[in-house]
Amino acid sequence: MYRRIQAVQQGVMTSDGAGVKLRRVFGYHDVPRFDPYLMLDYFDSRHPEDYILGFPWHPHRGIETITFLFSGQIEHDDSLGNNGIIGDGDCQWMTAGSGIIHQELPKPSPHLWGIQLWANLKAAGKMTLPRYLEITAAKIPQVERYGCKVRIIGGSFAGVSGAAKRPDIDACLLDVAMPPDKEFRIEKDPRQQVFALLAGGQAEFDGQSPAADQPGSVILYEHGPEAGGQIRIYSGTDGARFLLVSGQPIGEPVAWGGPIVMNTREELDLAFQEYKNGTFIKDQSQYPSII
């Protein structure tokens, strides 16, 4: 039995940071539909004025931020002392955990094109040790299946593991490129959340629903005990490229305030009070990694 599409969602155009234009495909009002994922922003611009002011210094706690670039460059600095530039095909997978302050500044380029995805942390992991993974394109393993090229950014596929791991939710992030008129198949636990972000081309994501052809659209699959285990995707005459994302839902309360996501309002208020009084960044020895 294969899995059917629950919804196709394009989100809304908005701006964030210091005025970066982007498409918020899903976010605050979509919890818990995408659990364990919280937010997905899609950006696609050939005009630096749309993004050049970037995302100046800001805090995060209780989440992971995952930035993946199809093309372009983004410079990163954070309170742990990490800094660098991610470029074409690179990924930045950051666990904010107990607290991190960072900035992300896109560089002028012919085409800035990519996504930022937020993954939630379980209550037991909200105050985990922060960490930062800069995953260059060369470090992302690639396999070929069914005539398609699959880059494994996080999790695993076909027995091959990517650089990023969230075993507590079995997080998986795949970059799939399909030639024209091909079929791609993957097995997933029916209880897992699965969605695809179409980046280009055209594809039928369950073989029965109309083909998706709008870049930046998210195709959300059904999940639960009655959902199918196999996902089948059929590319159109121009082929298709998409990110396939999956994970085990957390099912916990969400208290969300801007860049911080906790479980209760009290935890959220405390986080902002600590940011205000300068105690937001914690002694890392007090918060070991439990991810």
Image: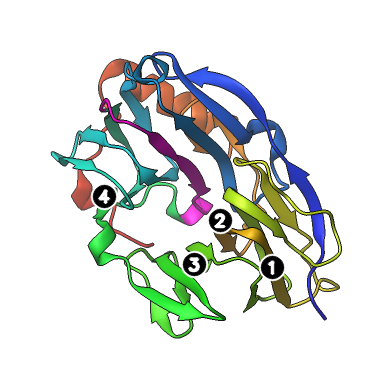
**Is residue 291 left or right of 246 when viewed as pictured?**
left
Q: Which mark is residue 242?
A: 2
Query: Closer to the N terminus: mark 3 or mark 1?
Result: 3
- Outermost residue, bottom side: 159
Q: Residue at x 67, y 41 (%)?
A: 214
Residue 291 % position (x, y): 38, 62
Q: Which residue is mark 1?
A: 233
Whole-angstrom CA distance, mark 3 to mark 4, is 18 Å
Whole-angstrom CA distance, mark 2 to mark 3, is 24 Å
Q: Which residue is mark 3?
A: 168
**Image quadrant assignment for residue 105:** top left
Q: Residue at x 50, y 29 (%)?
A: 268
Whole-angstrom CA distance, mark 1 to mark 4, is 33 Å
Task: For residue 6, say whether it is visible.
Answer: yes
Amino acid type of the residue tagged 1 in the rendering: Ile
Q: Which mark is residue 132?
A: 4
Amino acid type of the residue tagged 3 in the rendering: Asp
Position of residue 270 relative to residue 181, above or below, is above
User: Given this view, does label 3 or label 4 mark the residue nearer the observer?
Assistant: 4
Taking depth in this image into account, of 253 and 14 the one nearest to the observer is 14
- Residue 117 covered by magenta stretch: yes
Amino acid type of the residue tagged 2 in the rendering: Phe
User: Given this view, does label 4 or label 2 mark the residue nearer the observer?
Assistant: 2
Query: Closer to the N terminus: mark 1 or mark 4?
Result: 4
Task: Tell me the element at label 2.
Answer: strand
Residue 45 % position (x, y): 44, 28
- Residue 62 covered by magenta stretch: no
